[in-house]
Amino acid sequence: MLIGRASKLAEEQVVLFLEDGSVFCGSLFGSPNGVPAIGEVVFNTGMVGYPQALTDPSYKGQILCFSYPLLGNYGVPKKEFDEFGVLKHFESERIQVSGVVARWVCESPSHYDSQKSVSRWMEEQGVAGIKGVDTRALVTRLREKGVMFGAIAQDVEQAKNALKERTLTPEFYKSVASRKITKFVGGRKGKIALIDCGYKLNILRSVLKRGYEVEVYPYDTQTKTILEDRPQGVILSNGPGDPRIWRETIELAQSVIDENIPLLGICLGLQIIALSQGAKTYKLKYGHRGQNKPVIDLKTGGCFVTSQNHGYAVSRDSLKATQLAEWFVNADDSTVEGFVHKSKRCIAVQFHPEASPGPFDASYVFDVFLNITQR
């Protein structure tokens, strides 16, 4: 199936080829050195927040399609740091996606804080994109068929060869995590250990702003090492890939729960905790990726709009045989969006309470967790 055509013949023509044989034509933007770009093709429904989305480590190994037709209108902000020394405006130090798909890309952005266009930013970081694509048709196909691997390439033949040679190993996904312990000082209320599976910077900032010191640990840190530093609580971060590949972190979660140290899981962190307690995870047809995902708090009956980015979920039925009780459910499809441990100091959410991008309706989850650490 051949869909769409490029509008500017002077621009380099490329294709987005999907595993099911679909071909979407368009023009190259970003870096020519990023071609061919291979990855799981997914879509995000947010209208804004592309600097945060493109730098979200959870997108590692994925080609991201923006369903909103305009990309880059307000450019890319300059690199600056907050009072804690944490990078502002971005969720990691670099673009994490393998490629980008867009309908229209603004090459002359207008914003007082803009330093460059998104195309130039991608070119500097070696990331390729395809524009001029009928993104509505692409999103419809992914919704109907499910997310699948694809490639941005010069032609179909190059794309097919690239897909045959892909090697997205567990080590590839885990490469987003740091390999050293890093300390950040936010206040004197206590110390929180953040386990890095590819954490978003606003998770770190959200804890620092509440007056806590944070130490960031690699995903495979031994429980003994963390206990020696005597943290008041532990946070398991978001991250990319199938949660089952994070075996060391699953064992860590089990140990932390056994020690009854307060534990908060966010996104991938929730899935890791669930696996550590005997629950099961499964792959969603096309995931939850956007800034307007409604969840229901089963304790209060309140409904909150949340930011989400995940392609896996926890089986509701599998929770019944564990000590985990549902806390939040998705208002659209009733999938698990949060749980609490029935006897240990452990809570977890599938959405992103730190937002960035998105609404801060559910940021109180951090306060719930930090209150637990004070008991």
Image: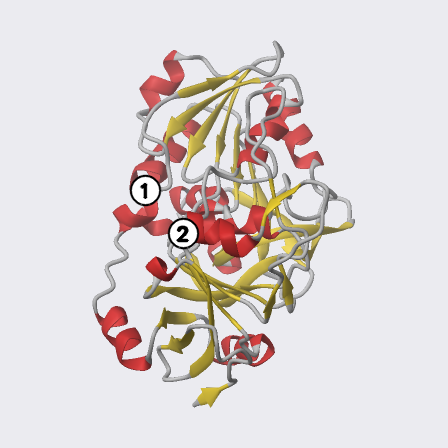
Residue 350 visible in the current orientation: no
Q: Nearer the viewer, residue 42 or 279?
A: 42
Query: Which residue type does callout 2 highlight?
Result: Lys
Residue at the top extreme, as displayed: 188
How packed is label 2: few (under 14 Cα within 10 Å), some, or many (20 or more)? many
Labels 2 and 1: the sequence-earlier one: 2
How packed is label 1: few (under 14 Cα within 10 Å), some, or many (20 or more)? some
Residue 55: x and y in percent read 50, 46
Question: Does 101 appear above or below 346?
Answer: below
Question: Does 332 appear above or below 344?
Answer: below
Residue 272: x and y in percent read 42, 44
Mark 2 lies on residue: 60
Query: Which residue type does callout 1 highlight?
Result: Ser
Say what secondary structure mark 2 lies in. Answer: loop
Spatial separation of the CA atoms under disc 2 and disc 1: 9 Å
Residue 8: x and y in percent read 53, 78
In the displayed structure image, the side of residue 74 where residue 237 appears, left or right? left
Mark 1 lies on residue: 175
Residue 336 visible in the current orientation: yes
Residue at x 38% of width, y 19% of height: 226
In the displayed structure image, the side of residue 17 where residue 306 appears, left or right? right
Q: Do the residues labelled 2 and 1 touch (CB within 8 Å)?
A: yes
Which quadrant would residue 219 be assigned to in this image?
top left
Q: Which of 340 and 353 is in front in this view?
A: 353
In the displayed structure image, the side of residue 5 where residue 359 appears, left or right? right
Q: Nearer the viewer, residue 271 or 375?
A: 271
Q: In which quarter of the image is the N terminus?
A: bottom left
